[in-house]
Amino acid sequence: MQPVKRLILATGLILTCLASFGASPPFLPDSYLRHVKYLASDDLKGRGNGTPELDKAAEYIAAQFSASGVAPAGDEGTYYQKFMLTTGSEVGPGNKLTLTIGDNSYDAVLKEDFVPVGVGDQTSVSGDLVFAGYGISALEYGYDDYQNLKVADKIVLVLADAPREKDPKSPFKDTGISQLDSDLTKAINAKYRGARAILIVQDPLNHPNETEDLPRLAEGSQIDELGICTLRITRSLARRMLDSQKKDLVELQRQIDEKLAPLSFEFSGVQAAVNMDVSRVRKEVRNVVGILTGLDQKLREEAVVLGAHYDHLGRGGKGSLLTQLIGQIHNGADDNASGTAGLIELAAALARDHGERKRTYIFIAFAGEELGLHGSSHWTQEPACPLEKVVAMINMDMIGRSRGNQVYVNWTGTSPVFPKLVTEAAAEAGIEAKTSAAGPSGSDHISFYIKNIPVLFFFSGLHSDYHRPSDDWDKINAAGAVKILDLVYRVATRLNRAEARPLFTKVDTPAASGQSRTGSSGYGAYFGSIPDMGEEIRGVRFADIRPNSPAAKAGLRPRDVLIRFAGKEIQNLEDFTYMLRTHKPGETVEVTVLRDNQPLSVSVTLEVRR
């Protein structure tokens, strides 16, 4: 039989078996919201990874599973699957910044004059000081603070943010992550120009309150390894540097903003020396795993996985979109107490539905998602059942802020049965399902997709409280969330009871518009790889390569490790993202990967991000 005919017949058989199985049990807004209120309460302090409060959340979820009759499926007969995770950084007393101005030196004070925000390859560096405006290179706008400025082996002082920050018509207006105005992009830009360190000072025109100069180092917050020593410094320290050159920080910023032209220069007789003392903190965290064993003798060995991450940002730190509010509790009501509460409610409903259960259900509340999908990656490496027996994975991440009786259902292209299945289930549930063949990659379903498991990702949409302290329970649309749970229930039961499992298909369609979980407009030119978020290495390991993508056409494969892009070393995902944003569709670049620990160089022609 030809492959196409087999696919058509198999698809028809599955759709026949996926007939309506009756109405779902009622999901009550008050019951759902009760879980959200607890998980997103100040008592849990934002459920940061490695904190006692995340452990409390895990114990709450396990207790709810137990009360519903969901059996444990973690380590040694418990609900918990433990794993180690780099949860943050420890800032030691050896962090130093020394200025030498002529014959005089000044030792800056840690947490009073400066704080480290990024770690370099070298722990001790020194060099002459240069001022590079905002530290932005935006050739598409005809603007480059580094034009005619030599910064190799030097220490760079830059302003935070971007020119005309408060002007909505500014060409630099961009609020996303890894954009022109972020500390991260400024640091990588300086690194690739050969600078040894970068000092970032808050711009005075738009931020007159000098108490905001230094971001708070939230307890346990993670300081990224950026390949360049990166410090935030106070305006008073910057003035000390500029006074020696008879220059004024406010006037420099005003002139740059008025003319949209750089005013970069080399300091005369001023040097800086930086010493970094930052170490990784590794702690044990836990996935919470429950199981409802199937009752059909033929199908009980197969499983439908339902998941939601229950960790959030704690008191901010890495991931917070309001760095000046780091230290405040980020409760993460929508992200992702909303999905976790949904997982609890679905587990209870499906446990009551035991008479109709054919396949096994596995419920997983993941830890480590906010730091890189670590919990789901760990579970797929050490699953509660063989991965080949997992017929589908349903992920709920941010389902609490639905608008207009609709929900995004992404990655329907991972099985030929999904589009019709979801559409029919949504019609029965009375909710509009906005489907897309693929979708956002930054959540736990991706750990299953790269293992060739069909996935569905339920998401109610982005909002202005995302990764901010204002993501609180009182903004949750509980009535809308339980409508989404009704849909998820109908989809899950269809998958559970179907005689044939859904076929898996790879997809090459990028995320649907308007769904970026970062709020950014994208990551530049299209490359076509999915990074392995669960492994801490130097470089970027590809978890998967999208079919028909530039990476696929160049012969790149899953498990390759990207180490160079267009002649620049790639140390981490941030470097890779930066390079994609600074190259245009149509460009052909040489990339080097490690394949089986051997370097391999190929040419990749970048494409438009569709």
Image (cartoon, rainbow, N blue to C red):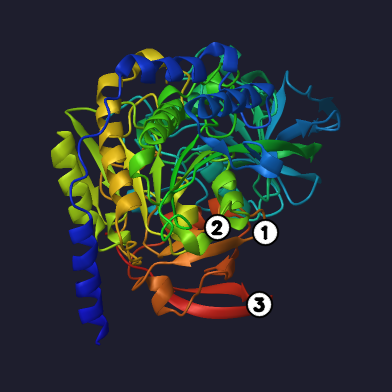
> SS for tag 2?
loop
Gap in angstroms between the C-alphas marked 1 and 3: 15 Å
Q: Point out the tag, 1 or 3, that comes first from the N-terminus.
A: 1
Classed neighbour count for the residue bearing mark 3: other residues with Cα under 10 Å, few (<14), some (14–19), many (≥20):
few
Residue in the image at 52% along x and 45% along y: 185
Relative vertical location of residue 599 with respect to residue 608 in this rendering, above or below:
below
**Which of these two is toward me, 458 or 354?**
354
Give the residue type that dot 2 points to. Asp
Residue in the image at 18% along x and 67% along y: 12
Circle 1 is placed at which residue position? 538
Give the residue type that dot 1 points to. Arg
**Which of these two is toward me, 446 or 220?**
446
Residue 2 in percent (x, y) is at: 24, 87
Circle 2 is placed at which residue position? 532
Q: Point out the tag, 3 or 2, that comes first from the N-terminus.
A: 2
Circle 3 is placed at which residue position? 596
Position of the N terminus, as image quadrant, is: bottom left
